[in-house]
Image (cartoon, rainbow, N blue to C red):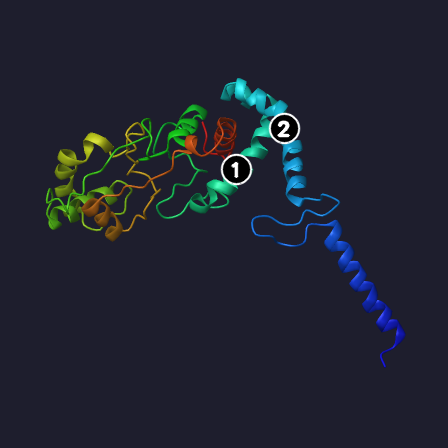
Amino acid sequence: PLPKWWLWTFYATVVWAIGYWLLMPAWPLVSTYTKGFLGYSQRELVTEDVAAAKSEKSAYRDKIAAMDLVAINNDPELLSFALAGGEAAFGDNCAPCHGRGAQGAVGYPNLRDDSWLWGDGSLAAIHQTILHGIRADDPETHTSQMPAFGRTGILSEPQILDVAEYVLSLSGKADDKTAAERGTKIFGANCAACHGADGKGNPQLGAPNLADELWLYAGDKQTVMETIRSSRGGVMPAWAKRLDPEIVKELAIFVHSLGGGR
């Protein structure tokens, strides 16, 4: 025979289970489940907690909705709230591409430096980019397209090599000065309209500065040639369709605070 203490423990668990089945949600039915006499619902508790959190934040959110970005940035209390919210939103929505520290990656801009593909790094420019995206499905999105000079036959492979040498010469990295000289004229005829005669870019067109040490897709000769040959066309979502306006403002203020904002 089993020990009495073991039997009584077993009987107690049976009684506990029956009581739990009666008091708490327990048994699945065809389209619902037994609610239990206590009416307990973890989903309702979470909903209440979320509502309470939103209620606590509503005073700040209302102010953020009503104020412009500069005013928020100049209000220490609101700025602290916006930075905390922006950091959380960045981690949830932007970090997969730009990195947790916003340092960027190949094809994804570093948001901590002073090199901007679109705009001047001001709060307004950053906010505009987050709202409407780049080459996104939005009527106000930033859009431009560099020709695929090789695939479309505009330039031959030797010409692409010469232009690449010239582009690399702008940052002192050219290997063949003779090729770079030939590339000067080709660049002037095909690339200067967007990148400028000096190659320093045009942030209104999303044309990057080619004369600095910063590269979105790497600055070795083969990568530069591939960019000229096949073009690039990165896409950023229009977050206005996915996030609340207040969160977009918080994101803009957070990105601006990272060190590259002007």
Image coords of residue 130 (percent x, y): 42, 32
- Give the residue number, with chain letter if any, for mark 2: 57
Q: Quadrant of the N terminus?
A: bottom right
Q: Check disc 1 and give the amino acid type.
A: Ala
Q: Residue 89 carries which label?
A: 1
Q: In this view, does 118 lie above or below 37?
A: above
Q: Which residue lies furthest to the front in this view?
A: 30
Q: Crowdedness of circle 1 by 10 Å Cα count: few (<14), some, many (20+)? A: some
Q: What element carries label 1?
A: helix
Residue 66 lies, with reference to residue 158, above or below; the image says above
Are the residues at dot 2 and dot 1 in contact (C-beta closer than 8 Å)? no
Relative vertical location of residue 61 with respect to residue 111 in this rendering, above or below: above
Q: Pick whichever, 3 or 225, lies toward us.
A: 3
Q: Which circle's residue, 2 or 1, is located before the other in the chain?
A: 2
Question: For the residue marked with disc 2, what is the amino acid?
Answer: Lys
157 to 111, vertically: above or below: below
SS label for mark 2:
helix
Q: Which residue appears at 18% of the width and 50% of the height? A: 176
